[in-house]
Amino acid sequence: MKIKKMFLSLFLSLSLCVTPSFAESLFFSEEPIQDGLNVFEVSATFADIYQKLDSVNWAGKNINIAIESLEKLNTNAHIAATDERIVLVWKDAIIANYPRPAKGDWNSFGEITTALILKLRANDSVLHNASESEMYQMVVDSLMRGIDENGRYIFSRKAEVEEDGRILTSVGLEGARDSKGNYRITGVYKDSPADNAGIREGDLISKIDGKFVSQMSDAELASVMSGFNSGTSKLKLLTPAGNKDVVLRRATIILADADVVHRSNPETGGILEIVIHKISDNSAAIVNEALAKYTDISGVVLDLRAAGGDDERAAAKLAGLFIGQKPVLRIVETAKDELEVVPGGDAVTDVPVVVLLSDTTRGTAEAVAAAFYENERGVLVGTPTAGDARIATRIDLNNGGALEVMNKSIKTGNGGNLDGRGVFPIVCLSNIRSASQQNAFFLNVINNNFNAQDFNQNSEINLDDVKRGCPVITSGTDEDALAYAVSAKILTDKKVYNRLVAE
């Protein structure tokens, strides 16, 4: 690796220049490729990153912290960025020492970052063997964690494909080995190759490409199920209808942001169960379509237990389908500035709603849950949410990638705090897990003897105490069955629903 040495004369360091001069390049123009990287392109990318992070005021941090965060790439590295120097120490030895560039000299900061990366690659085999896309992901993720622990770097998919032509694909099924070593299918992705081939949950795969699954290693099995680019395998299935041979080709799997299940009932119209994976325009459209299709339903279970999101407009669209033109959330960028987000359209349904919550409900999903609560539009059931209510500023980069800095917090539509606090259920599932507990609970509600405390109204509560009193349910299967049973009871008993909404 050839890097020019930079010398600062004593005269220049003592001179009274109003505008500091920018440093000359660290690299030789006739040697652009070093360790497989185009140092000028890499430097330009980091210069772009630093300049654009500066436009959002470093999310409350500064460029020193960003550069020093590169030491997170390896525990043997330590970086110190002062007002005068930028120094990289590997174990006990100084392996890089550069004068700090002038303020706003983003090109020089970019070159120093590239030089640090080259030094780290020379000492770190993992970083050295990484492709360019992997290198960017590792380095910029490290840098972003210094600025914002929830920030991230999104590498350009187009650039990644052009670099190594790889796209992750899957046959679209999940499963586990049984006691005999065969592969029992436990789930099939909708519209995946496996789904289109008629494979169903419970089917058993006994052979793949003529080889018994029991004789295949876990790595061999995994390579069939997913990998880079397409691949074809012949499977022998044992199904309830008999043996079946299926040929599957891996393909890119696109997962929907929401799933809808209509549990029909001839008398009541049934219940619409909507599972939200991500608060997005797509999930709002899916919910809108489902509500338009099933107009005779008696209630909706809106499952936000695994939902997240950082799109405030999508959150307004989704919540607006149920609450209409009322404030859904507020975005806080500074201590003085709050932006109120209100849906643009009227509600499309007035049926009763149960909103399911858990500790993995986060981001704008927490704001949606709070909107149902504040507008008395649904009953909150489950366990306390994550209290991780922040949304990102997306910064597009010149290389086609982007940065996401989680520098905006979210409040409820009425101005209540969400970030660091969360939303609390009115009905805590973990306290009514048995049938006898559920019967006693609903009897108390009907008899107007429901004395549960609404922690959403108390700003002085101890969050740890609340979470200990309403703990996370560790078994997903148990939680699913319990959540639906309790939700169905609430939605099919008007007296119970009305009293819980009024709490």
Image (cartoon, helix red, strand yellow):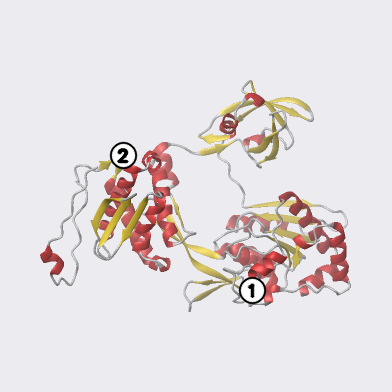
Give x and y (percent) for residue 355.
71, 63
Task: Please give the label number shown on residue 56.
Answer: none
| Furthest residue in direction top, as rendered | 210
Give x and y (percent) for residue 122.
32, 42
Task: Please give the label number shown on residue 36.
Answer: 2
Q: Is residue 401 left or right of residue 318?
A: left
User: Label 2 amino acid?
Assistant: Gly
Sequence-first tag of 2 and 1? 2
In the picture, the quarter occupied by the N terminus is top left
Measured Cα–Cα span from mark 2 to mark 1? 55 Å
Considering depth in this image, is 383 or 309 the residue closer to the camera? 383
Considering depth in this image, is 61 or 208 the residue closer to the camera? 61
User: Label 1 amino acid?
Assistant: Lys
Give x and y (percent) for residue 94.
28, 51
In the picture, the quarter occupied by the C terminus is bottom right
Q: Which residue is mark 1?
A: 326
Q: Quadrant of residue 239?
A: top right
